[in-house]
Amino acid sequence: MNIYKKYCPNIFVMESEEDYNRGDVVEIETRYGKVNEVIIFNKLFEREGKKYYSQIRDDGFNMQERAKLKSAKYDTWSNSAANKADQAYQASNKHSEFLSLGEPIKVGHHSEKRHRKMFEDANRNMYKSVELSNKADSHAAKSAYWQSRENDINLSMPESIDFYANKLEQVKEVHLFLKNNPDKRPHSYSLTYAKKDINVAQKNYNTALKLWGE
């Protein structure tokens, strides 16, 4: 059975014993036993009788779709926690009218147990409300983070060829400008960092071509 193998950060390729061509649609099994249909792009290398291919999901599911699902999931959890926090807050105020009177607990009186329970319930529900409110905020922050990544492009996508080609041109322009204008460099290592950006962008572009280029 064809399986996934990690190729580089964020990239999983298909390991197979079979020969495939670009455009073939084949099945691949995840480590959890789920089977996906993928579209073959390039044969990357062969080792010990195993062939390794770049591939994408046939159903279009990719990193961007994953980000959308995670954003929606955390948004749902945030709304649920916020609703529960509100319910707990309302419950904490159930006896607020009576408790606001400052009536002391009458020890030994038949009302003592009920009076103490009012305080306990109010405190418990208020703490619960705060806890759930904090949880709602945490989920909302995660939802916002994943929403910000819904248009990200990385090496797991064929679109990364154009993305990194443009990125490479941009960093080259920055490097050339700093090289020709020493007085515009923010600090003494600016040119070094700009050259490093070129090296990273070039490496990513080369990897994108290997994975997805014809």
Image (cartoon, grey):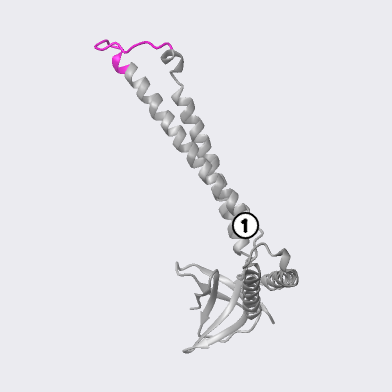
Where residue 17 appears, x then y in whole percent? Answer: 50, 85
Q: For mark 1, does the 10 Å Cα neighbourhood hold few (<14), some (14 to 19), or many (20 or more) residues?
A: some
Q: Is residue 91 above or below residue 190?
A: above
Measured as percent of width and height from the top left, residue 18 is found at 54, 85
Q: Please tell me in which quadrant of the rendered image residue 154 appears.
A: bottom right
Q: Can residue 40 be seen in this view?
A: no
Q: In which quarter of the image is residue 32?
A: bottom left
What type is the residue that disc 1 sits on?
Arg
Q: Give the range drawn in magenta.
A: 101-114
Q: Is residue 185 visible?
A: yes
59 lies above or below 20: above
Assess whether residue 55 is covered by the magenta stretch. Answer: no
Q: Is residue 176 left or right of residue 33?
A: right
Prevalent SS, magenta region? loop
Q: Pick out the residue farthest to the bottom.
A: 49
| Depth order, front residue of 197/192 | 192
Front residue of 70/36: it is 70
Q: 18 or 122, which is in the foreground? A: 122
Residue in the picture at 49% in, 30% down: 87
Q: Which residue lies furthest to the front in this view?
A: 183
Q: What residue is shown with label 1?
A: 149
Q: Looking at the picture, how far across and down is residue 63, in whole percent?
A: 60, 63
How many numbered badges does the structure rendering display?
1
